[in-house]
Amino acid sequence: MENPSSIMIAIAWCLAWGDERSSPNLAMLEQTRQALKDNKELPEEFKKLVKQVQELQNLPFPNTVEELKQFTEKYPHLWDSQIGLVYGGATKIKQYVFEATKLPDIRGASALLDRINLIDLPAFFGKGKKSITISQWLDNNFPELENALIPELIIYSTGGNILAFCPAAFVDDLANAIEKRYTEETLTANSCAVGDKFKPLEIRFGLLPNQIDKTFWLEKYNSNIKHPLIQAYFPQPDVNEPLQAFHERKSFNELVSKLASLFNQRRSGNYFVNRPSRRYPPMFETHPYLMRDGSDRRSAIVQVNELPDIPKLSETVARKRIIGQIAKREVFQENLPAWFRNLHLNWQPVGISIKSWVAEFEDYLKSQDDNQLATQYYAIHHNPEEARSLRELGNVYNGFVAYIYADGNNIGGYIQKIKNPEAYQKFSKDIFKATEESVYEALAQHLRPHKLKNLTDPDNENRNGCWIHPFEILTIGGDDVMLIVPADKALAIAKTIGEEFERKLAELEDYQIPQRCLYHRYHPQSALSSQCKLSMSTGVLITAENTPIYYAEKLTNQLLKSAKKLSKDLKKDGYYGGTVDFLVMKSVTMISSNISEFRSNGLTKFGTKQQKLKLYAAPYTLHELGGLLETAKALKDAEFPRSQLYQIRSLLERSKQTAILNYRYFRVRLSDKKAQDLLKTQFEDAWCKPKNPANNGNLAPWMSLKEGKEETEEKVTYETIWRDLVDLYPFIAKAQDNSSLTKSKQQTLQS
């Protein structure tokens, strides 16, 4: 076999293993696997089987049930045999990660889940560095499982989930092992894993009944194509090509859909006869007279005086804290701190590598051939530490930080069109690589190491003078990203992540779409659509460093949902690019309910003749966000008086005409003619032009939200970016400040 894929090796391995729990000849199986990898001569007894596996990949799609039946007769081993397929991973991740209030515990929870997903579970299959700890664990809990698993069986294991083949006899064992590993390591994190057995022919043609004559195939599909159930099961985005919907559904995709359905059933508590139920989550007994841990959920087992915040820890939180310290390189696995050793727990965080995302970031910069990113990022300091607290991150910019939560768009729709395991595997690798590298490049472009200063609280004052990485990567999982960054760079970082994600995927042929001009609110004539089928939506919350993390995460998630809603709406008009929603929250009491209600009740007014006035313009496309930042810089450079900024904002609520009049009055009174021209170019001409080119009027500071031939002026909705500009104003640096900062950094480097 020439250049066999890992999927072909996996299928051949499962078929050669058979339906028994022990292989008749494990040494011969290993020899066959190695021969396939090295493209060498195969053992005689496996040649016929491997040939059928190779032919499976190239079978033409049958047009009738009779043609399908002929395949079952021609390839009996592909019809009579079974292969296991298992899908699983962590669930309710945010509930586990953000139940704690302290960043070290949140960091540790995220690092522990990442370690299980990216290291432990692949190690079941022997992937990565050989782990004695995992081997011992499998031998103690599932003694026959390790010999049956090889690295090629993994289809993907990123994004918090794993999808993998396995010999049919080990489906339940592998699913149970995945769930047990999460529970034993975390104690309280929810996880779920399901599996089923399929015929090899089903990998190519989707689910098939045992009585092949009763298969629902193209004959019945064509005669019932208008039936609502048929249209629901076989989505038809293009009504001109109904056969394409059938081909896309009757493939490996249908097997994965079945596992996804089983996954949801088991996660919801439905009983599985052949496996223990997981309807009941881990429970820890508490007592009204016993001291509880910091999350107030479980009884504490110790109060650690050696740690800065003197925390009360349950075993669950103690595990999070020590994992966080190891990931941040504050302590080492070979020399655990006394406070943890004195707990005398049966569980120990040793034997398995734990690496933080910041360490991965450092490795990425070192791996670049041109070294340009590393030179740019380390321009003022070469060896920064990782930030230890939100207080240190807030020290970067006046006590404010920003939470960034990004998630992929159109991912589900793209997955529905994937037809084979190889494409699933490639898709998972492409997305994870694009996401991870986009984050690293955005951070390296916009941030520099920061020297801590003026820390006065007892927990941090001894850190003054230390250089730190000015960001925290909570997680990068598949197409998900959660970051904490300095407030003044947050929107630029979010924009770059979205742009880099699309650019990197657009370089690959599978994700390309033709580029064309689309309407944007900012300089529509200069905007082009994305060249990529996939993109990212992002929520950004700029807030004080002492804002409770669980509350900040809740609001950031709402902003992400708002950005994704805009992305979904714009997709109808052919826009596939990224979107960003943001909020500047200077007080925790600023929002009493949720962001949507705050905007609809507090920032939406009705003017004369029932004109609807939106005092905000978020969310934005990436092109519009770039324009918003440019406009904010123009205001800063024009030295637009802050008092007048706030006064114009307060007048927005009165009426459209009042706001226009006051804006014009303040603009013409600017002392600098250059500042007037700059404001006109960067704000009025860029944002506030009427939709009708024949209309030479000026709407500033408003822009009309909707357009339509039948819309009258009374029904048009007007919105403005002015409030967003005012909110961003304190977090925007003047151009001359940026240039002087660059000059200062260059002088530092030279000295």
Image (cartoon, rainbow, N blue to C red):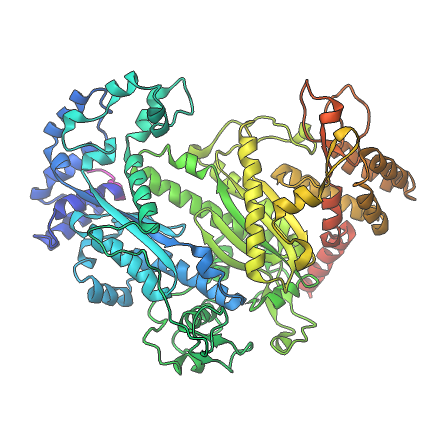
Looking at this rendering, what residue extends furthest in the front direction? 288
Depth check: 289 or 489 in front? 289
| Quarter of the image that includes the C terminus | bottom right
| Quarter of the image that includes the N terminus | top left
* Image height of 329 relative to 642, above or below: below
Q: Please give the count of numbered marks on the rendered protein.
A: 0
For the record, the magenta segment spans 1-6
**Could you say which quadrant of the image residue 134 lies in?**
bottom left
**Position of residue 283 measured from the top left corner of the image (x, y, whole percent):** 36, 66
Tell me: 294 left or right of 72.
right
Tell me: 393 left or right of 155.
right
Tell me: 48 left or right of 557.
left
Depth check: 75 or 231 in front? 231
**Could you say which quadrant of the image residue 712 lies in?**
top right
> Would you say the magenta stretch is mainly helix, strand or loop?
loop
* Image height of 309 relative to 186, above or below: below
**Position of residue 56 measured from the top left corner of the image (x, y, whole percent):** 20, 33
**Position of residue 237 measured from the top left corner of the image (x, y, whole percent):** 42, 25
Depth check: 90 or 7 in front? 90
Residue 381 shows up from this direction: no
Residue 661 shows up from this direction: yes
Query: Is residue 644 inside the magenta stretch?
Result: no
* Image height of 212 relative to 443, above or below: above
State the residue at coordinates (47%, 36%): 410
* Image height of 204 relative to 590, above or below: above
**Position of residue 594 measured from the top left corner of the image (x, y, whole percent):** 60, 49
